Amino acid sequence: DQQVKQNSPSLSVQEGRISILNCDYTNSMFDYFLWYKKYPAEGPTFLISISSIKDKNEDGRFTVFLNKSAKHLSLHIVPSQPGDSAVYFCAASALGNQFYFGTGTSLTVIP
Amino acid sequence: GAVVSQHPSRVICKSGTSVKIECRSLDFQATTMFWYRQFPKQSLMLMATSNEGSKATYEQGVEKDKFLINHASLTLSTLTVTSAHPEDSSFYICSARYWTGDTEAFFGQGTRLTVV
C-alpha cells in the first residue's frame, strides 16, 4: 500500500521556468515531510522539509507547499536550471516513525 | 543542521563476502536510526529500525541474519550485509533522529553496493 504517491514519473521544463513537482499522501497522521533530489549513481541530497504546522517553507529557489486538507505536497523550483535535472522524491513520516517515500519524479530541465 | 555521515559511499564486493556500512551522527546523539534500501526505479523501503543499546526491529521480509544491524552507541549504527549475493546490490541509506518520536530526521548520503 503506497502511502506516498508521486503520480508523475517524469517532467520536462524549460530553463528559467518554474518546475512544480507533486506528491500526494493518504495517511492523515503524517506530520513531517521531505523532498530529496537524486542524481544517477549518487546518494540522495536533502532539499527541503516542512512540518505539518506550516503550509509553506522556502529555501532559495525551492519552496515546498503543504495542503493538509487535500493531503498534497508540492515542490516549486524557480527559476529552473539544467543542474536541477534529477529524480525528486518526497517522503513523509508520522510521530517520529519511519519515512515513507514516493516513487520519484524525474525532472529534466531543458537549456 | 545536523549531519549524518554514511561510509562508504560506494563499495564493490565479491559474492559470498560480507560488507559493513557505517552511519554516524556527527554532531548529535541519535537514539533512533533507520536503514532503508532502494531497488532500481522504486521507492526507498525501510529495512529496520535500531535503537541504541537494543536489538533492531526488522520489517517483514527482511532477513535479520543477512542484514545485521548494530547500534552500539548514540553516534554509530552499522549495517553488515553478510554472504552478499548479486541480488543484494542496491542503494542503502541510513537516517537518524535525536530521539524516538522526534519528527525531524537526518539522512546519510547513501551507499551504493555492487556485488559481483
Image: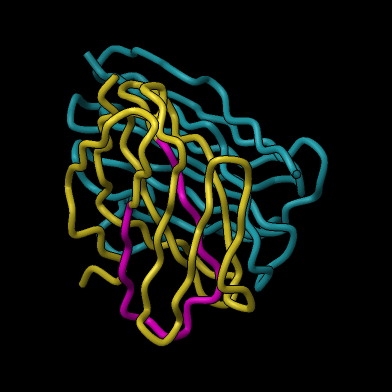
Q: Mainly helix, strand or loop, the magenta region?
A: strand
Q: Is residue B53 visible from the viewing direction of this image?
A: no
Q: Is residue A36 magenta?
A: yes
* Residue at 48% from the left image edge and 71% from the top image edge: A66
Q: Residue B80: percent from the left, percent from the top? A: 46, 34
Q: Residue A64: percent from the left, percent from the top? A: 50, 58
Position of B9 compared to B66: left or right? Answer: right
Q: Is residue B32 magenta?
A: no
Along the viewing direction, whichever of A61 and A10 lies nearer the viewer: A61
Position of B69 compared to A69: left or right? Answer: right
Place residue A100 in its image quadrant. Answer: bottom left
**Can you say which quadrant of the picture contains the C terminus of chain B?**
top left
**Can you say which quadrant of the picture contains the N terminus of chain B?**
top right
Q: Which residues are magenta?
A: A21-37
Q: Is residue A106 visible from the viewing direction of this image?
A: yes
Drawing shade for chain A:
yellow
Along the viewing direction, whichever of B28 and A28 lies nearer the viewer: A28
Q: Residue A10: percent from the left, percent from the top? A: 18, 42
Place residue B75 in its image quadrant. Answer: top right
Drawing shade for chain B:
cyan
